[in-house]
Amino acid sequence: MAGAGMAIAVLTSGGDAQGMNAAVRAVTRMGIYVGAKVFLIYEGYEGLVEGGENIKQANWLSVSNIIQLGGTVIGSARCKAFTTRAGRLRAARNLVEHGITNLCVIGGDGSLTGADIFRSEWGELLEELVQDGQISEEVARENCRLNIVGLVGSIDNDFCGTDMTIGTDSALHRIMEVIDAITTTAQSHQRTFVLEVMGRHCGYLALVSGLASGADWLFIPESPPEDGWEDLMCERLGETRSRGSRLNIIIIAEGAIDRSGKPISSNYVKDLVVQRLGFDTRVTVLGHVQRGGTPSAFDRVLSSKMGMEAVMALLEATPDTPACVVSLSGNQSVRLPLMECVQVTKDVQTAMDEKRFEEAIQLRGRSFENNWNIYKLLAHQKPAQEKSPFSMAILNVGAPAAGMNAAVRSAVRIGICQGHTVYVVSDGFEGLSKGQIREVGWHDVAGWLGRGGSMLGTKRTLPKTCMEKIVENVRKFNIQGLLVVGGFEAYEGVLQLVEARGQYEELCIIMCVIPATISNNVPGTDFSLGSDTAVNAAMESCDRIKQSASGTKRRVFIVETMGGYCGYLSTVTGIAVGADAAYVYEDPFTIHDLKANVEHLTDKMKTDIQRGLVLRNEKCHEHYTTEFLYNLYSSEGKGIFDCRINVLGHLQQGGAPTPFDRNYGTKLGVKSVLWMSEKLQELYRKGRVFANSEDSACVIGLRKKVVAFSPVTELKKVTDFEHRLPQEQWWLNLRLMLKMLANYQISLTEYISGKMEHVTRRTLSIEKGF
């Protein structure tokens, strides 16, 4: 065992954040898995200083059934004592008593900086303990080095260098739930709402919730409004109302300031609206609601991944490696030097204090800057510089997926900003063939952001069944750009249109596919729009099922998820709910594997945890159906446990889109239309567009860290059309984590460790996608 003889302690410190428990669980289990002793430190640094009962050795079951809980089960406290040398001396003694020389700290930048100071003083602290006769020289020699690894738990997402911190996505879930609820009451009474969200020094939560709700006005500390903003804001709110809107939403971060650094309070904004416009206005301060509640699927998977990586970083630490933070970049784990991140985080604050606001936004990283620019583009209609000669049509194809409407809304608005004529098509390619095409304006898509399903209506019909009629309507409406938002059929449909270009010159136009399907099976992207919402829906159902199983004892649930042949949904949901197994088509299994799973569950029933959860993707095996699994588990487990089946079905397709899908849809809509505009300009000759090259029909997608456009003809080579799957799928390496956290003995040789990367102004300016 790689970790034999090691002792690792884990603590949570600072403000709590949803997902901390998933991280504690992953660190504990991964530590035990590699053969180390793992200790839980209760009440943060306070427990570290006090010692005694606050430091307890953990076993596999210590962290069972906590993944779905908000907050932190091991407690967190702000600790004065640890900021003093005497306090750190006591902490060092408590660690040495247990032989602990590896510390994993889950907290914000203050907590992580404290850990780094502790590490740098470690040698001197031990010397002092030897001089005082508290420990022997031999003990000091055995524990001469302290390794530190940090996981950033902060709902503000205010730690530079990391894409997302633990708790941010869940906090956005809470905020969006409140905004959705407030929108309905505001519309009924024609009210204006001023919503104050957390973020004393960082406007991330305000910015993303403003972008994901289409707020009318936004205050963030990094970019104070220009002087005279009061007039402009009131003018804009009045304008929105005169165009027929029944509500206004203003979002303000608690740390909002004006250009001179004076705070702007939510009550000041409210009084302003009441006095100048006479609108019925209410303030809602969200406060600690944002920290509460169950963690989202993203936070559970992020924390589990980071927890595993943290243990690997401690295993591989040498005397020369700096204290590091484990983070996520795109969908890869990375390690970042702790103090580099802390330094850039401090630089942002300095830039804000010195009123260098442009720079503050750049230091927050490229995706923060992108969010801000896109918010400004979409919040308010700016008349196009000139009318362009181009017309584009937008349609939805395939099954409905959450986030489709967000993509259509932003695509329509950016198209109008560019001066294009924008058409929308009802009912997919079938509607295009029947001429169900209408021109839309800026306000026709107001309020679409938070709507689930497809407002345009969608069908699975492919173009080859009605090619002639499609060509006729493309000619009739003079469509030069086609934006198709949908799943595998959208990609396949555009491919058919491209392949028919030889026959029909009218199809030599610019085409783009925005992948939107809960199955996440479109080639050319790591994430499809709608899959985050579907995973969250499946996860919520499984949480309830697990709760029911815990009550009845000795019960195993077999849950069937959707996804066609693609096992993404069941794998990611499996990690988020701590499933015992997830059967998928891409990871072939035999009757021997099923037997091993049944035996695994039989052993589990002998412990205190007498419940099981097994996920099965709907098409994972031709013969081993859900019914078959039920019969097998029932007869093999007879007298030990009983079984129940749950088919989640269309639950996974419905619901309001998650903040991620709203934001992702909005950005894909913007980027795809900007790309199409560029291509149209490029290929415009003598009053017409003629596009025949491979790169004139693409799928837009997030690949590792970047937004990329991949030609459909290129993607055809890497697609398995029979099973409607890309031939290579990045998420298959998550299956290792699923099996390890469920206590299956597997080899760690397949585990891919994160690389150490540096955080500089240059790395922050790199386009990171989302």
Image (cartoon, rainbow, N blue to C red):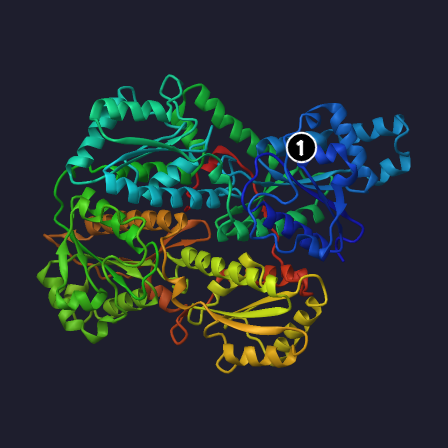
Q: Is residue 602 above or below residue 341?
A: below
Q: Depth check: give the residue in front, 245 or 301.
A: 245
Q: Residue at x 31, y 56 (%)?
A: 404
- Percent position (x, y) of residue 212? 35, 44
Number of numbered discs on residues: 1
- Percent position (x, y) of residue 104? 67, 42
| Quarter of image, res 120 | top right
Q: Depth check: give the residue in front, 273 or 79.
A: 273
Q: Is residue 290 above or below residue 23?
A: above
Q: Residues within 10 Å of mark 1 (few under 14, many from 20)?
A: many
Q: In the rendered image, which residue does mark 1 sit on? A: 116
Helix, strand or loop at mark 1: helix
| Quarter of image, res 105 | top right
- Percent position (x, y) of residue 760? 51, 34
Q: Is residue 298 above or below residue 51?
A: below
95 relative position to 731: left or right: right
The residue type indicated by label 1 comes to Asp
Residue 370 appears in the figure: no
Q: Depth check: give the residue in front, 99 or 347.
A: 99
Q: Residue at x 72, y 67 (%)?
A: 606
Q: Residue at x 68, y 77 (%)?
A: 639
